[in-house]
Image (cartoon, grey):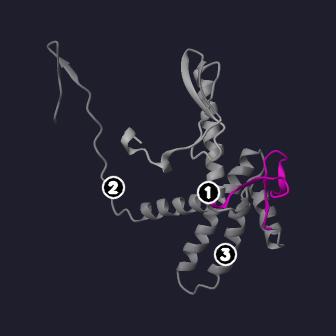
């Protein structure tokens, strides 16, 4: 509402307390006790600017997780469990393809296994051994088996509460696939010549256009 004349019953609300308070050197108006607020304000304070920035990023990440869960209330296991399971299913699907598409699907499955491989390497484990163990467990039906970075072993990620929103996982895989397809569609690359340094002659800067 920008004008008093535009106020309607729908724009009005109730609050238990409307109070002006001084926070540090700034005066702020606090509206509290609203029965059905359409918006809320989170006040972050800290001893230094970088601390407040970090707190703001943390709150933003937490709210983003809640938003994603509200949009699609499904979760999947982390630790590379989803990628290994998808790779296994894709290999099974690829074996049924009679054409050269089989090779492309196999390579896509191999690319998905890069995630648990990097996680294993980050945890100081042998990626080849970890991938072999993950493939074995997923073939046995342990679809939530993933890389436990803290424990340094392969474990059930759901039992360890290592989870992530399914919406985020789908978007990550979709974006990565689209980026790869875009790169593969490039026919040629035109590289620009590096800028030439300015040469000083007679006390003046002159640019060579040779």
Residue at 81% x, 58% y: name it. Answer: 158
Mark 2 to mark 1: distance in Å?
32 Å
Magenta range: 143-169
Residue at 53% x, 59% y: name it. Answer: 176
* Location of residue 177 in the rendering, given as x and y in whole percent from the top left corner: 52, 63
- Quadrant (top left, top right, bottom left, bottom right) of the C terminus: top left
* Location of residue 2 in the rendering, given as x and y in whole percent from the top left corner: 38, 39
Residue at 72% x, 61% y: name it. Answer: 76
Mark 3 to mark 1: distance in Å?
24 Å
* Location of residue 55 in the rendering, given as x and y in whole percent from the top left corner: 64, 32
Camera-side mark, 2 or 1: 1
Q: Nearer the viewer, residue 15 or 129?
A: 15
Residue 168, label in figure: 1
Q: Earlier in the sequence, mark 3 or mark 2?
A: 3
Camera-side mark, 3 or 1: 1
Q: Residues within 10 Å of mark 1 (few under 14, many from 20)?
A: some
Q: Secondary structure at mark 2?
A: loop
Residue 91, label in figure: 3
Which corner quadrant of the image does residue 98 belong to? bottom right
Residue 5, label in figure: none
């Amino acid at each position: 509402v920008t004008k008093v004349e535009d106020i309607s019953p729908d724009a009005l609300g109730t609050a238990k307390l409307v109070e002006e308070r001084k926070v540090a050197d700034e005066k702020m108006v606090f509206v509290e006790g609203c029965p059905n607020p359409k918006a809320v304000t989170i006040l972050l304070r800290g001893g230094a600017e970088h601390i407040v920035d970090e707190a703001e990023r943390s709150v933003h990440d937490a709210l983003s997780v809640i938003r994603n869960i509200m949009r699609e209330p499904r979760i999947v296991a982390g630790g590379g469990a989803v990628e290994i399971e998808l790779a296994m299913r894709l290999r099974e699907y690829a074996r049924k393809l009679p054409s050269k598409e089989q090779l492309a699907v196999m390579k896509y499955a191999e690319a998905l296994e890069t995630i648990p491989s990097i996680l294993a390497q980050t945890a100081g484990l042998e990626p080849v051994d970890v991938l072999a163990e993950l493939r074995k467990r997923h073939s046995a039906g342990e679809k939530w088996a993933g890389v436990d970075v803290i424990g340094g072993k392969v474990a059930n990620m759901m039992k360890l509460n290592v989870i992530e929103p399914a919406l985020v996982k789908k978007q990550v895989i979709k974006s990565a696939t689209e980026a790869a397809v875009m790169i593969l569609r490039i026919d040629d690359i035109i590289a620009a010549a590096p800028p030439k340094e300015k040469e000083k002659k007679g006390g003046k800067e002159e640019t060579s256009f040779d």
